Amino acid sequence: MKKQPEVNKQKEETKEKLHPRNKHRSRYDLKSLAETNPALKDHIFVNKYDIETVDFFKAESVKELNRSLLMQHYGIESWDIPPTYLCPPIPGRADYIHNIADLVYRENPSLIKKRNPKLVCLDIGVGSSCIFPIIGNAEYGWSFIASDIDGVALDSSKHIVESNSKLKGAVEFRKQDKSHRIFRGVVTNDEYIDVTICNPPFHASKEEADSAALRKVKNLKGKKAERTQAFGGRSNELWCEGGEMEFISSMIKESKSYGFTTMWFTSLVSRQEHVVRLRQVLDFAGVKMFKVIEMGQGHKQSRILAWSFLTKKQRQVWTETRWK
């Protein structure tokens, strides 16, 4: 029996770190995916370990793999994104959604097994792929408000929803016209949101984003350290002034104005050292509860920062009344 290379064993161990309900914990079944989406066949090859795979350094291969996963696991009929826009890793995005489900249903765990269109999730920066609404609606039946400052990205996600009958009526799109605002201009003061999610721009500059991309290339075995566009990403998707620390700090400060009309606020945080500093911002804002949810995604660790201005009793009343 042929011994499995160590690199593949490591990948399997990484997969095991994903949430128990995540559909992507095992190796991709490329044969089955290609039967679902025949266009994927042209992107599959046998590597030096005699294992079928796709070239994760080719943008079209990554996009076709994503399309296949969305078709097979989430019932999507049509999906595409514009050139150069971020093509997100679906297992990691699914992990965020599953961990958020545990969070919002923690006061009433029995509801997690039921589809809940009354639960409203605000996706801050939906991007061009509409990934979070697709997964959240398919897995839990949630309704979404999707915002973005990029009109092209917003139009792309709108087109995805319009092209898939199962998503129609489940996602409402709102343009954010002010780059320094997050909630204002998108959410009204009397509108109730159950949970917010966000994949913020992680980097503080284009140079920092490029450097991170090179490190990603080096981490993938057998590839030269050259800038790759396989995963894409526009400037507003990858970096902003002050990076994720400034972005999430602004989000926390602004969230205080919506503390009694939103049950949970959340955001991905890429750097562990930022959590300590963000906790100080949360304390200053006067949150009643905060939680850090660790996640294992691919070759890196990530985490969700969640906070609420409601007490446990208030959140319990919230779940018992809003979702009846």
Image (cartoon, rainbow, N blue to C red):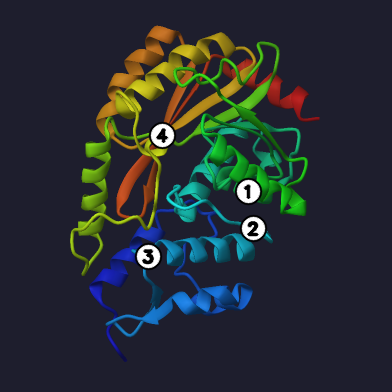
Task: Tell me which numbered mark, 2 or 3, is placed earlier along the sequence.
Answer: 3
Q: Are marks 4 and 2 in contact (CB under 8 Å)?
A: no
* Label 2 secondary element: helix
Which dot marks residue 134? 1
Q: Amino acid at mark 1?
A: Ile
Which dot marks residue 236? 4
- Classify residue 279 as left or right of residue 219: right
Q: Amino acid at mark 3?
A: Lys
Which dot marks residue 58? 3
Residue in the image at 63% along x and 17% along y: 313
Q: Are marks 1 and 2 in contact (CB under 8 Å)?
A: yes
Task: Tell me which numbered mark, 4 or 3, is placed earlier along the sequence.
Answer: 3
Q: Are marks 1 and 3 in contact (CB under 8 Å)?
A: no
Among the 4 quarters of the image, the one containing residue 6: bottom left
Task: Tell me which numbered mark, 1 or 2, is placed earlier along the sequence.
Answer: 2
The crowding category of the residue bearing disc 3, from other C-alpha atoms within 10 Å (few below 14, some 14 to 19, many at least 20), is some
| Residue 159 showing in the rendered view | yes
The crowding category of the residue bearing disc 1, from other C-alpha atoms within 10 Å (few below 14, some 14 to 19, many at least 20), is many
- Classify residue 205 as left or right of residue 168: left
Task: Tell me which numbered mark, 1 or 3, is placed earlier along the sequence.
Answer: 3
